[in-house]
Image (spheres, rainbow, N blue to C red):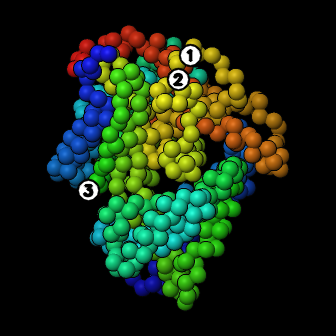
Amino acid sequence: MTADAWIGGIIARARRPVAVLAIALASGCATNGADPRDPVEGFNRAMYSFNETFDESIGKPVATAYRDALPSFVRTGVRNFFSNIDDLFIGVNNLLQGKIIDATTDAARLTFNSIFGLFGLVDIASSIGWEKHNEDFGQTFGRWGAPDGPYLVWPFLGSSTLRDSVGGLLDVKFDPVRNHRPVDVRNAMYLTRAVGRRADLLDASRVLEEAALDKYVFQRDAHLQRRRSLIHDGNPPRDDRSSDGTRAPRVELAPDPAPAPVIVQTPPRAEAAPGPSVGPAIENAPQRVGVTYEPRPRQDYDAILAAAKAANDAEDAERSSPAR
Amino acid sequence: MAHAQETAPDVLVKNVTLEVMDIVRKDKDIQAGDRRKIIDLVETKVLPHFDFSGMTGLALGPNWPKANAEQKKQLTFEFRTLLVRTYASALAAYRDQKFEFRPLRLKSTDTDVTVQVRVMQSGAQPISIDYGMEKTSAGWKVYDVIVGGVSLVANYRTEFGNQVRDSGIDGLIKSIAAKNKSNAALAPAEKK
């Protein structure tokens, strides 16, 4: 197949998602936004369904073809190549976050993989224990204390937040691929990188497909949890009352005095103020999101687990018979 | 200070993971995408170490106490089925990844621990898989799986909460059951 025919096919296929986008935008904005982290849920859902359609008709088929056509070592090479380029600004962001040792590792990785890893095609640094990091400007802002802000879904780019979108602009600005010339080489690199990334997510997206009752909600919550974890390099602070890693003393199932963590309980529809405008929501975002967003609500695990346990004691006893 | 009779949680996770991965690597049917076999494997090797009523209770959150005994039973059953399939699906995606098991400094008084496992991969940050585990009379049981910082249990809370709000506990049971049904129908097509 010639390149022209291929691109022609892409454009033909793109008509469908564009039509869906128009319909989704026209109809989607009426959804209720009960979740304070997601004040523009209607817009986001419209974008989400656009992205889904695009992915179904173009993204996934192209990524699958890429995966099936190329042997694993080539795909790994592509991943490593772009990963190596990324290490430059991962290092910069680690530096901005004051993580000198991590930044040093990133610089060492970049140098080492570029020289001995055939321009980054082989990730030798990882195999000698210089671990890859995951950083970007959004995480740096988060580290500096910027709250998530409203959850946002962008066409083609997918899940983000207001803070991460601002960070993303900087990521794009400094992206070495973007600044590569000539332009057609750059564009080919863009395309390869995007396809490779999508291909790496094929398995994950299948799992998501099977796991989620409402994919939009499931993906949103997973994204927010993931970002929080990344900002804290895998160790997000817990609200446990004890500091030594043991669980806080078991408490009776008391009604939560603080604003209930959103992830636990969405306020009933009736409570949603009629037509909350975007303006005040964003204005309020710093406190509200900071307070309500708690993806690992360990503290109420205690009470809930105790309740669950009490209710299921009989069942547990039954299952404990083949104890080892 | 009784000496623990049961296997320490980190040892348990390591043993089970290595055993299961070994089977996955050697079994040609699983390699070829035989879903039923992976599900059987998860059922027999992995599931006995999960506390499903606990997990379901955590995922339901404040709605759990509102369910009656029969509803709790059904919820646990359906959620279990959903997780088995999800887990099997995730497992099927693993090939030759290397695992790093973080040893746990376990005190004899500990009843709730997080066991950390990391999946190493080329050109990307390792994926962390943390198991929230609790000591029970039947040994250590997993009550949450946290993949890349995403808690499975926490992630179901909003979904379940929305469903209960819209259509009650029975609505939620129905909706998980429907999901399980459509997942089961998917299985033959997955085979490739």
Are dots 1 and 3 on a single chain? Answer: no
Q: What kind of residue is marked 2? A: Ala
Pointer 2: what residue? A248
Element at badge 1?
Answer: loop
Asked whether A35 or A213 is in front, the reply is A35
- Compared to B120, does A187 lie above or below? below
The residue sitting at 59% across, 32% down in the picture is A239
Asked whether B93 or A65 is in front, the reply is B93
How far apart are labels 1 and 2 at the CA level? 8 Å
Q: Position of residue B43 (x, y in %)?
A: 27, 32
- Give the image quarter of residue A288: top right
- Compared to B125, does B99 lie above or below? above
Pointer 3: what residue? B96
How far apart are labels 3 and 2 at the CA level? 39 Å
Q: What kind of residue is marked 1? A: Val
- Image marks 1 and 2: residues in contact by CB distance under 8 Å: yes
Work out whether residue B56 can be spotted.
no
Q: Which chain letter matches label 1?
A: A
Pointer 1: what residue? A251
- Of discs 1 and 3, which sits in the foreground? 1
